[in-house]
Image: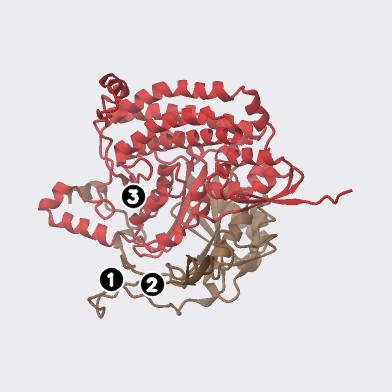
Chain colours: A brown, B red
Amino acid sequence: MSIEDKLDDLEEALEEQLEENHAECKWIRANGELTLIVPREQLLAVMQVLRSHHDLGFEQCIDVCGVDYAAYGHSEWNAEDAPNTGFSRGAERETITDFQAESRFAVVYHLLSLSRNVRLRVKTFLDADYPVVDSVTGVWNGANWFEREAFDMFGILFSGHPDLRRILTDYGFIGHPFRKDFPLVGQVEMRYDEDKGRVVYEPVTIEQRTLVPRVVRHDCRYEEGRELVKEEEQADG
Amino acid sequence: MAEIRNYTLNFGPQHPAAHGVLRLVLEMDGEVIQRADPHVGLLHRGTEKLAEHKPYNHSIPYMDRLDYVSMMCNEHGYVGTIEKLLRVEVPERAQYIRVLFDEITRILNHLMWLGAHALDVGAMTVFLYAFREREDLMDCYEAVSGARLHAAYYRVGGVYRDLPEKMPCYEMSHLGSEKEMKYRNQAREGSLLDFIEDFTERFPGYVDEYETLLTDNRIWKQRLVDIGVVTPERARQLGFTGPMIRGSGIAWDLRKKQPYAAYDKVDFDIPIGSNGDSYDRYLVRIEEMRQSNRIMKQCVDWLKNNPGPVMVGDYKVAPPPREKMKDDMEALIHHFKLFSEGYSIPESEAYFAVEAPKGEFGCYIIADGANKPYRLKIRAPGFAHMAAMDEMTKGHMLADVVAVIGTMDVVFGEIDR
């Protein structure tokens, strides 16, 4: 049974189950993967169905991942009125404010069914001011740390999580480092202070440099329905 | 009577058995663990954020530094995701080279795990034995990539270069005698593949040596049997993968179930445990080394008889050959664009996972049409295993914590990322 056949079966089962449970979900199929987009309020109910129903049976939650969509599709490359000096010339970096506030954040779950040998991606969008979603730790205990990580990195809150603490950042860390408005070089640096006899935190003194600017290019070779240029032609050409 | 109260104990981060930088806060009732709270993140470097600020190709060396004892498997997970997004077909020879080096990596990792685990539990010799064989395998890494650890050998579209015709030899110095040099170089007379073939002949004997030291060793069994038992049901719930879930008796291996590269063309078996304790996981990993050896043998045979390209001919993702750049303007432009700006990936997202020695290592990339990933999420197997620390050590003695950390095969490069 090929992956495509399995996804066909999965799509069918999903359609049936979601309708039965009155869930308003959308799904996207691309790259041999199925993505289910679930509204925030219905997430927990849908997840329970996904785990427990025998036609679906996703026993494992492989990964939980936070995403910040604030800078999606932005290009930094400005060759026209850029200065011709400086290290990161041509690269513009400004704070982005024109993002869609109601779907700034997303939580992406990767589920795996061992019995059916199929994967499913579940995505739910959260708004910028109040990014909170139900925790799935009750459905899959393994999601505990993954949700803590998403909280730490993006500030996404998981209601019903038994122990929502920071996990990867330093004790007493301020901010959520993977948000797009958090600079790559960070906010503070630390050093040992001889006089005070302890480690002190100070604002960063280094400046962020762009080695290669971010450029968005539209490659017509990957347009919908277009076959890729064959390897041999490329090699000769 | 004196008041009895629980005692909080800090285990690590500077404890030799903490495998790096684990700070474990243990709540003890006498010598029995009531609660274990691992504090991770002391090695957090923000790999995912760094990757968002670099063209796709620049992040391959970061992957080596995640799980720094199974380097090439991490690279495989990363380049595999990009290949999936770009729909690049990797040449068959490169697929076999990847399988060969994935298995070399698996043995490297398991040897490191075996040595460190045995050392933690009190057996010194195994560590020395394991490092003897690691030396040979790291020489293979060096022969193909020039680096013994952080290889950056897998590239999008194939591998960096074909296997070398000549295995590097030891050179004479004032320290050794000529006779000794000849002895040390005897397996290195031919090509790299000859060297690996010779290794696969020798290796099963070495595994027997480890087993004589450990498998029926009374002390080893006392320390591992019935320690850190995980039932199949709990293993699924906790998101276990790799030898951890196989030790609990679930025959789940991505190399078999969702084959990638050339794994569907090689023959091997999946070992599983029956009790889900540390001893079973030990047996599973020992058998995995033997199976890896078997796969390596098949790859060597295939690679010896099937020459061919090891990189795609698409110059948008792979550099053109040096000679071509001398008289072909287009090749020169391709080269310049590839190394300055890199390639852009159209708006899409993909998740691709490989069976790394520790479990499922996956990369999830969201591309927004730029030359850098919009979001890269690395799914490290050790992270899910570490999260089960509390459950696996509860009710055990303090000394068993060391055995449980050992059996989980944790490396903080990948947990903290």
In the rendered structure, the answer to whether residue A46 lies left or right of residue B71 reads right
Position of B268 relative to B343 (above/below)? above
Q: Are marks 3 and 2 on the same chain?
A: no
Disc 3 chain ID: B
**Which residue is at the far right?**
B1
- Mark 2, Cα crowd under 10 Å, few <14 / some 14-19 / many 20+, is some
Q: Residues within 10 Å of mark 1 (few under 14, many from 20)?
A: few
> Does residue B24 appear in the picture of this structure?
yes
* Picture residue at 38% right of the left edge, 42% below the top: B149
Quarter where residue B19 is shown = top right
Residue A236 rendering spot, x and y as whole percentages = 18, 48
Residue behind mark 1: A87
Residue A154's spot in the image, x, y percent? 54, 67
The residue under label 2 is A74
Amino acid on which the number 1 mark rests in the picture: Phe
Quick check: B219 left or right of B83?
Answer: right
Three-letter amino acid code of the residue under disc 2? His
Between circles 1 and 2, the one closer to the viewer is: 1
Q: Which residue is mark 3?
A: B156
Identify the subunit bearing mark 2: A
Mark 3 vs mark 2, CA separation in Å:
24 Å
Percent x, y of residue B163: 28, 35
Q: Is residue B230 visible?
A: no
Q: Nearer the viewer, residue B184 or B60?
A: B184
Percent of width and height locating residue B126: 52, 28
Q: Which mark is residue B399?
A: none
